[in-house]
Image (cartoon, rainbow, N blue to C red):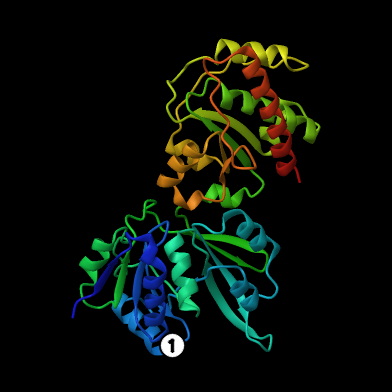
Amino acid sequence: MGTEVLRMLDRGAQQEELARAGAILREGGLVAFPTETVYGIAVAAHLPDAVEKLYELKQRPRDKPMTMMVAGLEPVHERCPDLPAKAVQLMKRFWPGSLTLVLPTTHEDGTSAGLIGFRYPAHPLAQGLVKAAGVPLLVPSANLSGEPPATTADEVLAQFPDQLDIIIDGGTAEKGLASTVVKIENDETTVLREGAIPEWRIDQPHWSHVLFVCTGNTDRSPLASALLSRRLAAALGCSEDELEDRGYKISSAGLAAEEGRKASRRMRQVARESFDPPLDLDGHRSQRVSQDLLNQATRVVCMERAQRDEILAFFPHRVRDVVLLDPEGGDIDDPAGQSLETYRRLARRLDAAAFLIAGSLVP
C-alpha cells in the first residue's frame, strides 16, 4: 500500500485531517508535512521503535540527533529550566520561524540530559500538526540523508513512495532552505548550520534594520523613513549620521517602484514645512522591494494590508516581523493626487507612528 497524500486545499477540513495525522503519530506512524523552510517527517519522540524506523528510513547516522518540533515555549522551558539569556533573546526575535536552537537539557532530577535541538515553526500546518499530535515530535527534513531537502509533497513521495503513512500536501515550502541551527552551551553561541536566517543576523543580535514599504516609494515610505531616523536619533541622543554605528539602519522601498524617482513634490514640500527643523527629502531616490532588502531587514513596516499579504505570500516565515504601520491594522492610504492638507495629515500620522517605533527599538 502506497503513501497516502492529503491535499490540504479545503481549509474547512484541515482540523479533521490534522487530528487524524496526530493520531497516526501517537500510534507510531510517520507523517511528512510542510514547514516554512522545507518539508519534514515527524515521529513521536517517546516511541523508540518509531524513532528507530525513521532513522532507518532516512539512512541517518544514529549519532546525528533529530530536532524536536514544538508549537510553543512551554516544552522548551520544561526541558531547559535554566535557559541561557542568549537563547531567550533569539527565541523572542526569531520564533516562530526558521531557527533551530540546540540547548542543554535536564532530567526531572536535575541531571544533564544532553543537547536537544528545538524548532518552533511559523507554518500554520506545522503548528497545527504539533498541537494535534499532543506529544513531543522529532522532525528531520523529508529526504534521504545526503540528498537535497524536499520542498514539495511530490518530491517527498518520489523519495518515499510507500514508507510513510501520510504526506500532508500544503503546497511548496517557499523558502527552500533548511532552518538555521544555533547551539548555545556554556554561554557560547555557535552557528552549526547557516540556513534561512543569515549568520550575521545571529551574530549581531542588537542590529536593527527597519524597512518601510509602500507602493511607489515616493510619498509614504520615504517620509516614514526620514521621520523614524529623526525620532530614533533623538531617543538615542546621537546624530542621524551615527545611527548605523549604534546598530540601526532605516530604509524604504516600494513594491511597484520605478527605480531612481524623487520623492513627490508635495511630500517634499510638507516635509520642509511641517517639521522643525525641516526634513529634507531632496536626496531620496526610489527603489523596488527586493529579496535582498527583505533578507537584510529585521522589521518590515507596510503601509497597507495588501502589501503585507504580498510579502508574506513569498516569505511566510517572516510573519512576526512583517507588520503594518498602523498598530490597529488599518491602511495608510496613498496620498497621490490628493490635497496638500491630506499630505499634512499623513505627515502627522507617520510622525506619531515613528515615535512609537523608535520607542520599541531603544532598549
Horizontal relation, residue 1 to residue 16: left or right: left
- 127 shown above or below 163: above
The residue at the far front in this view is 12
Q: Position of residue 33 (x, y in %)?
A: 36, 66
- 44 shown above or below 239: below
User: What is the three-letter code of the residue carrying label 1?
Assistant: Leu
- 243 shown above or below 263: below
Q: Point out the image quarter for the N terminus.
A: bottom left
Picture quadrant of residue 225? top right
Q: Position of residue 224 (x, y in %)?
A: 63, 28
User: Which residue, given by chain and number where applicable, does mark 1 sit on?
Assistant: 47
Picture quadrant of residue 186? bottom right
Q: Is residue 336 visible?
A: yes
Q: Secondary structure under badge 1?
A: loop
Q: Nearer the viewer, residue 357 or 51?
A: 357
Q: Is residue 67 visible?
A: no
Please tell me which residue is depicted at 44% across the width and 65% down the height of the picture: 126
Horizontal relation, residue 3 to residue 51: left or right: left
Picture quadrant of residue 40? bottom left
Please tell me which residue is depicted at 56% across the width and 75% down the height of the picture: 115
Number of labels in the image equals 1
Q: Nearer the viewer, residue 316 or 266?
A: 266
Q: Nearer the viewer, residue 144 or 263?
A: 263
Please tell me which residue is depicted at 42% across the width and 20% down the height of the picture: 258
Q: Position of residue 238 (x, y in %)?
A: 78, 30
* Circle 1 residues within 10 Å: few <14, some 14–19, many ≥20: some
Q: Position of residue 299 (x, y in %)?
A: 58, 42
The residue at the far right in this view is 237
- 234 shown above or below 129: above
